[in-house]
Image (spheres, rainbow, N blue to C red):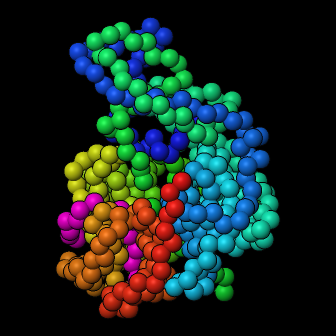
Amino acid sequence: MRQFHSALSGLMAIIICGFTMQGCVKDTCTRRFTMMTPVYKTNEEVRANIKNSPAKEVQHPGKMFVLGNYIFLNEVDKGVHIIDNSNPAKPVNKYFVNIPGNIDLAVNGTTLYADLYSDMVTIDISNPASIVVNKVIEDAFPFRRYSNGFVPDNSKVIVDWIKKDTTVECATNWISPRGIFFMDVRAFSSSQSAAVVGVSGSMARFCLLNNYLYTVTDNELNVFNISQAAQPTLANKIPVGWSIETIYPFKSNLFIGSRAGMFIYGTSNPAKPNQVSAFSHATVCDPVIADDEYAYVTLRSGTTCAGFTNQLDVLDITNLSTPKLVKSYPLTNPHGLSKSGYLLFICDGADGLKVFNAAKADDIKLIKTVNGMDTFDVITYNNIAMVIGKDGLYQYSFTNEGVLTFLSKISIQPA
C-alpha cells in the first residue's frame, strides 16, 4: 500500500539530500531544512480508529458533500464532520467520524464512502452516534506516492510526520539517513461533491451517478457498482490521462478535470464509461462544472499547478464530441466553482468569492465580490451558497439577481 501525507502535495520542491547510502551534498551555502520523519501504524491500528465521536472543532476544512439538510465536511486527513444544516443561519456541528487519511467523500442515503489513505471504506451512518464499517477495498486509490525516490515501509501506513528544522552547511559532506524527507522550508506550502440526491463540490474526486460511484486517481477513472450500497464492488479501472484532479457529473456525462485539459466521458454503459471528447489547455490546475450548453473551467497557477494562467474558460458543449472555447476571463487564482441558474460562483482564492451573471457565455459580468476570505470551493443548493475558506465554512443566501445575504460561519479552531 502506497500512502502519503496530503500536506506534501503542496510542495513546489522536495529536496532529498543524498539519493543513495553514499550520496552526499557539496555546495558553498547554508540552507535551512525541515526533516520529515514518518510515523507508522499497522493497517489494523489504522482501521481500529475508524469510529464516531461527538462533534469536534473544525481545524483544517477540506472538501464537502451536501445531502438534504446535512453537510458532510472533510477534516483533512482526519475524518468527516456531520453538520445539521436544517437552519443555515444556525448550523449545528453534531458528529465527527474518525477516518484516518481521509480527503474525499460521497454519501448515498445512509452510506458514506471515503478514502482511507489508499483504501476505500464504506460506512453505515444511519446512526451517526454509532457508525458501522461495512467494507474496506484495499489499494483502491494508489495515487498516494512520494517524490524523489522515497520508499516507505509498505507493510505499514504513514499516519503522520514528525517535523524538525535543521540547518545544513552545503560546503560540508552530509549523508542523508534513509527514511527521512528533507524539504527546503522556503518551498513548503500546504495544498489545498423521489430520492434525495447529494451534491459534491467541483474540487471533488468522488461523484455519484445512478447506481455507480465514480472516482479519479492521478491517471485512472475508477468505477464502483453501488447497487448494494453497503457492499460496493470495483467494476472497472479506466486509464484517462495524467495529473487527473477532479470529476463532475452532469446528466449522463462525467466531466473530468486534469492539469492538461478537460475530458468528457459518457455513461451509456455505466460500468465502462467511454471517452466522448477532450479539450486541452495550458498546464495548470483545473476543476470543471457543466450545464446543458457550456462547461466552465477554472485554470490557476500555484505551487502544485505550475504555469502562470489564472482564468475562467467557457466551452461550448452543445456538441459534446467537439467542445469549443467561447471565451476566457481573467481571474486572480480561481479554485472551485458552482452554478445556479444564470449565476456563476467562483472561489478566487485570496480574492474571495465572486458572483457573475453568466446569462451570456461570451459576456459574463461580475456582480459581486465577497472579500475577506481565502476561498477553496463552493456548493450552491436551494439558493444557499456554502463556501469553504481557509478559516471556516461560510453560508450565504442569494436571490436570482445575485444579492447575497450572510447567514452563518463555522470558524476553524487552531489546534
Q: In the rendered image of this protein, does residue 366 appear above or below residue 260?
A: below
Q: In the rendered image of this protein, does residue 230 appear above or below residue 88?
A: above
Would residue 257 be found to the left or right of residue 136 on screen?
A: left
Residue 201 image offset from top left, x and y in percent = 48, 68
Q: Nearer the viewer, residue 265 or 212?
A: 212
The residue shown at (61%, 40%) is: 159
The residue shown at (57%, 86%) is: 87
Residue 236 image offset from top left, x and y in percent = 62, 51
Quarter of image, res 142: top right
The part of the chain drawn in magenta is 325-340
**Does the stretch in magenta take in 326?**
yes
Q: Nearer the viewer, residue 299 or 46?
A: 46
- All told, the count of numbered labels is 0
Q: Main secondary structure of the magenta part?
A: strand
Q: In the rendered image of this protein, does residue 385 appear above or below residue 173?
A: below
Does residue 179 appear in this view? yes
Does residue 193 appear in this view? no
Quarter of image, res 153: top right
The residue shown at (68%, 60%) is: 97
Quarter of image, res 67: bottom right
Residue 61 image offset from top left, x and y in percent = 50, 61
